[in-house]
Amino acid sequence: MITQSELGGAQSNIIDLIKGFKQDYDVHLATRVEGPLTESVKAINVPVHLFPNLVRPINLLNDYRAIQECLSLIHVIKPDIVHAHSSKAGLVARLASCKYQVPVVFTAHGWGFSSGNPLIRRWIALLSEKLAAPLAKKIICVSESDRQLALSLGVGNQNSLVTVRYGISNINTPIPIANPAKDLPRLIMVARFNEQKDQYTLLKAIAQLSNYPIHLDLVGSGSSLEACKTLAQSLGIADQVSFLGDRTDVPNLLAQSQIFILSTHYEGLPISILEAMRAGLPIIATSVNGIPEEVVHGKTGFLVPRQDVQALADALKTLIQSPETRQRMGEAGRQKFLQEFTVEQMINETRTIYEQVLEKEYSQKSILQKLLRI
């Protein structure tokens, strides 16, 4: 169960989980509306259920109705486990599951109370997650950084919190397209245009590299897209930046690129970086949350402080000027991906959690039945 059916890391994670478990489990998907996620899931013959009232903003009437929608579905399909993703779906699922005593596994794809979020949102998220944490049998954090943050703030405990980092399929990556001017690499960032991502800082850094005729591809769409286009114009770099919108051929775009960048305010464990590592690209990324668990500074890429234009420009300059460094870091990043971030590893770790939850649930029911007979 997840709130949004858009393109995104959490949705990609759900698709991989469903594909990994559909042979051994009877799997259903619940979300708010039709979208790329539901299309992908229907294509592999997994049932989809829509909760029209499952909206992201806090709305007591809609939230109550979403809980009722969830209750109705639980009553019909009688799941052994509800696996909820994202804060709103996680809260609704945990509240609804109480009535039927169905165990809930909740995956937090980055905490709403992480630094970088607006202060009011952080406080609301922290309060709601503290109250809802006891209602989940297991809380999966996608990075150890997120797990430690939750522990430090009293969200969950050592028994309920567990880290399962994302994994993605090791597809045959496209052969990189030849780049005759290897000292003038093509840059790419794949991310939604919203308040979480920070294309603004990247555009300002590009403007500082006027001596290098580089080109930047920005993949994605969202509320801040037009503002970024305006900024590129005002900085005089519009001809160096392509706004490509949402794309389904990201592996091919990565194969045409030489440097991957993720400039952001906060993250869980971005899948876009894993895709770039799989493609053998060096990474420049903001050093927040789980990103340092993916990018080894100085080995697979460079980590820079949040909203630091100069640090980002300096890191870019280093990789632009050194094809050898790009190749060395890209190869090291691909090896790290193969060792730590495959989909098989993620599926196995998640399966273990399901089995632990079910075993404990059946054991408790057995004990209760024996006590009732006595």
Image (cartoon, helix red, strand yellow):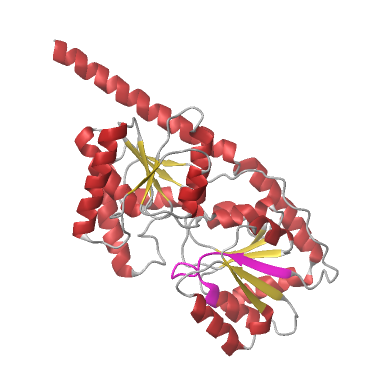
Position of 217 compared to 198: left or right? right
Task: In the rendered view, tell whether residue 357 sits above or below residue 329.
Answer: above
Vertically, is 298 above or below 90? below
Q: Is residue 299 magenta?
A: no
- The percent coordinates of residue 96 (x first, y second) are 24, 42
Going 52% across and 47% down the picture, which residue do you hit? 40
Compare residues 72 and 58 and report the one nearer the observer: 72
Q: Is residue 129 left or right of residue 183?
A: left
Residue 307, given in percent of the width and then of the height, sits at: 51, 74
- The number of discs equals 0
* Location of the C terminus (image quadrant): top left
Residue 317 visible from this viewpoint: yes
Q: Residue at x 72, y 46 (%)?
A: 172
Relative placement, left or right, of 305 versus 4 is right
Quadrant assignment, res 365: top left
Q: Is residue 81 shown above or below 174? A: above
Range covered by the magenta-colored residues = 186-200
Q: Is residue 175 left or right of residue 14?
A: right
Quadrant placement of the N terminus:
top left
Question: At which x and y percent is residue 287?
Answer: 54, 63
